[in-house]
């Protein structure tokens, strides 16, 4: 009797697990809200060189080609400036 209950319960549990995982994956795939992440209400900015997010208050800001860019470190800022200089316009 217990074996029969386990045989019936196992597919039901697997079904609900797969349904939950599938719904989460679909919701994540269709989520078109591409705002930068926030940490405890603080604004974050994307470093264009290494593609990491940095707290806006801690980021290094540089004006390059008239546009303000934020960087996570001095090294990333220098690498980005070098790439911009060597690229043909």
Image: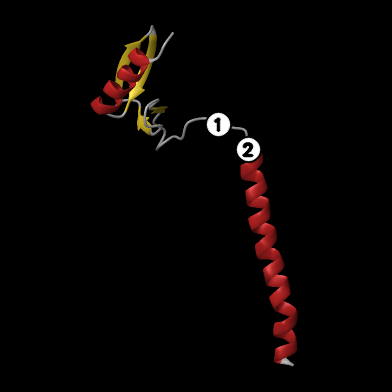
Q: Which residue is more in the foreground, 21 or 65? A: 65
From this viewpoint, is residue 58 visible?
no
- 18 w.r.t. 4: above or below: above
Considering every residue shown, the one lying at the far left of the view is 74
Name the residue at 39% across, 31% down: 42
Estimate how packed mark 2 is, as few (under 14), some (14 to 19) or many (20 or more) residues with alpha carbons within 10 Å: few
**Which label belongs to residue 34?**
1
**Which label belongs to residue 6?**
none
Q: Which quadrant of the figure has residue 69?
A: top left
- 85 w.r.t. 79: above or below: above
Name the residue at 40% across, 37% down: 39
**Residue contact between numbered discs 2 and 1, judged by CB atoms under 8 Å:** no
**Mark 2 vs mark 1, CA separation in Å:** 8 Å
Which structural element holds mark 1? loop
In the displayed structure image, the side of residue 13 where residue 63 appears, left or right: left
Q: Which quadrant of the figure has residue 40?
A: top left
Name the residue at 30% across, 27% down: 76
Considering every residue shown, the one lying at the far bottom of the view is 1
Estimate how packed mark 1 is, as few (under 14), some (14 to 19) or many (20 or more) residues with alpha carbons within 10 Å: few
In the displayed structure image, the side of residue 43 where residue 71 appears, left or right: left
Q: Which residue is more in the foreground, 27 or 47? A: 47
| Image location of residue 70, percent across then percent down | 35, 22
**Which label belongs to residue 31?**
2
Name the residue at 65% across, 64% down: 17
Label count reads 2
Of the 4 image quadrants, the one containing the C terminus is top left
Which structural element holds mark 2? loop
| Image location of residue 46, percent across then percent down | 41, 28
From this viewpoint, is residue 62 visible?
yes
Of the 4 image quadrants, the one containing the N terminus is bottom right
| Image location of residue 33, percent across then percent down | 59, 32
């Amino acid at each position: 009797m217990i074996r029969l209950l386990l045989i019936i319960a196992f597919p039901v549990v697997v079904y609900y697990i797969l349904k939950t995982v599938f719904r989460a994956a679909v919701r994540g795939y269709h989520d078109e809200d591409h705002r930068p992440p926030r940490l405890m209400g603080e604004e974050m900015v994307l470093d264009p060189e290494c593609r990491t997010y940095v707290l806006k208050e801690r980021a290094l800001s540089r004006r390059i080609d008239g546009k303000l860019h934020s960087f996570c470190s001095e090294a990333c800022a220098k690498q980005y400036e070098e790439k911009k200089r060597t690229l043909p316009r």
